[in-house]
Amino acid sequence: MQNLNLIDGRWCPALHGGQLAVTDPATDEVLTHVPNGGADDARAAIAAAAAALPAWRDRTAAERARPLRRLAELMLERADALATLMTREQGKPLAEARGEIAYAASFIEWAAEEAKRIYGETVPASHPDKRILVLRQPVGVTACITPWNFPAAMITRKLGPALAAGCTMVVKPAAQTPLSALALGELAIEAGIPAGVVNIVTGDARAIGGAIFDAPVVRKVSFTGSTEVGQQLMVQAAQHVTRLSLELGGHAPFLVFDDADLDAAVRGAMATKFRNSGQTCICANRFFVQAGVHDAFVARLSAAVADLRLGHGLDDDVTVGPLIDDAAMAKVADHVDDARRKGARLVIGGAAATPRPGLTARFFQPTILDGFTDQMKVCHEETFGPVAPVRRFTTEDEAIALANASPFGLAAYFYTRDASRLMRVAERLEYGIVGANDGAPSTAQAPFGGVKASGFGREGGRYVMHEYLDIKYVSWGLG
Ligand code: SIN
C-alpha cells in the first residue's frame, strides 16, 4: 500500500520527517504510517503544480481527457483492492466501499467527457466595427481539502473537473483516510497523468491549508467538510481573494406525506439515513411524518432497522460499520441521551454495541427516536451517526416550515404521490438538493451542493466545470 506523499511525480516522506498512523476504526489495527507533512511539503507541491500547469493547460481537450478516462478505467479494474483499502481505513461496509469506487470513477469519466465541451461564446456587439468574444480558461493551480467519510469520491469530484478544465491540483486528504487518496495517486501516474499535475500531501491540516491560502499562485480551493472549518477557510481565502467551493454541513429534513408510498419512503429513509453509518452530509437528520401515516411509517422503519447488521465492514453481510472515532461516538451517544432525557421515545437501538470480540467500542446501534422537539440537539445539530429522529406533523405548510427551520441547506427529501404537491414542495424547500421520492440523489451528472450555511459551488454535472474556469471577455476592435 502506498504511504508516501506524491509531489512532482515522486513519492516522498515529509520534508522535516514525522509520520501519522493510519488505523482501522473497527479494530484499532495500525495499517501503516503516512508522512506528517506541513507547510514546506505543501509549498513543494504547489511549486510542482505551478510548474506543470503550462504544459497541461496547453494540451487539447482530447489530450487531457485521454489519461482521465484511463484513470477511471483503472479505478474500476482495481475496484476490489481499492474498496478493501477504503473499508480498512474508513470502516464502511465493503459493498458500500465498492459502490463508492464506482461513484468516484464516474466523476473522472464524466469530467473527461466534459473537457471537450468547454465552449466559449460570441455576443452581438453594439458597434459594427467590434466583436465580443467570451473565452473560458482554466483558473490555474488549484487545491482541494477533502473529508474522511468518502475517501475517494470527494477527491475525484474535484480532481476530475479541475484536470479536465486544464488546471493542476494539490490534494490534501483527511488524516484518517489518506490511503485511498495515495492509491488514486498511483493510478493517476499509471494512467499517464504527467508529473506535477496531481500532487498529494498528507499531514497537518492547519499547516498545509495555511500554505495553500498563503500562496497567491493557488487560484481556487475546493473544500468538503464542516461549516465551522468552511467559515475559517473563507477568512483565509480573503488574503489573496482565492476562489472557493464549499460543500459544508447539512441537516436534511425527510418529509413523509399521508399520500406517500410508504414502502418507497422506508427504502429511501434507509438509504439516506444509514449509508456510511449515518456519516454523510446529506443524511436525513430530521424525519417529519404526517399524522395519518406516522405510526405505520415508524413501525415499518423500525422493522427495516432491525434487519441491519452491525460489524466490521469486511465481515460478511455487514450493513453498518463503525463510526470514525471516539469523538464521533461520544457525539452520537450525547444526542441520543439528550433526546431521551427531554422526552423522545426510544423505538429501537439507542446504545453502543460490540458486534463481536476484537472490535473497538465505536459501534452504535441503528436508532430511531420518536417525538423529537425543538429543544433537543438532534433538531439543530448534525448527528453524523445512525440515528433517525421522527416527529409528527399535520399540514403541508407546517412541514415546509419545520423543514426550512435550519441554517443548513444541503439536501432535503420528501415522499408524496401527488404530482402537484411534488412540484410545490420541491420549489418551497430551501435546499440545494431535493430528493422527491428519492433517498439517493447523488450522481456524477447532477449538480451537488448547498445553499445557506451548507456552502456554495456545485460538484457534478456540467455545472462543476464553471468552478475551475475563469471567464475572459475579449472586445475585438476590427480597426
Ligand atoms: C457527502 O456526504 O458530503 C457526500 C455524499 C454524496 O456524495 O452522496
Image (cartoon, rainbow, N blue to C red):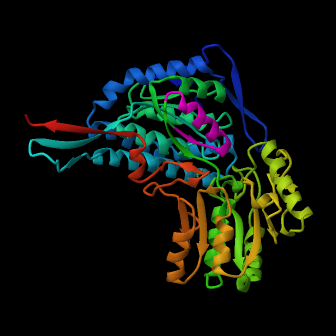
Q: Which residues are magenta?
A: 222-240
Drawn side of residue 280 relative to residue 358, left or right: left
Does the magenta segment cover residue 12?
A: no
Q: Position of residue 99 (x, y in %)?
A: 56, 54
Q: Is residue 252 above or below residue 162?
A: below
Q: Looking at the figure, which quarter contains the C terminus?
A: top left
The residue that appears at 68% across and 29% down in the rendered structure is: 32
Q: Is residue 280 above or below residue 235?
A: below
Q: Is residue 253 above or below residue 113?
A: below
Is residue 355 shown to the viewer in this render?
no
Front one among 227 and 38: 227
Front one among 228 and 224: 228
Drawn side of residue 340 relative to residue 10, left or right: right
Q: Position of residue 445 (x, y in %)?
A: 42, 56
Does the magenta segment cover residue 228?
A: yes
Q: Quadrant of residue 165?
A: top left
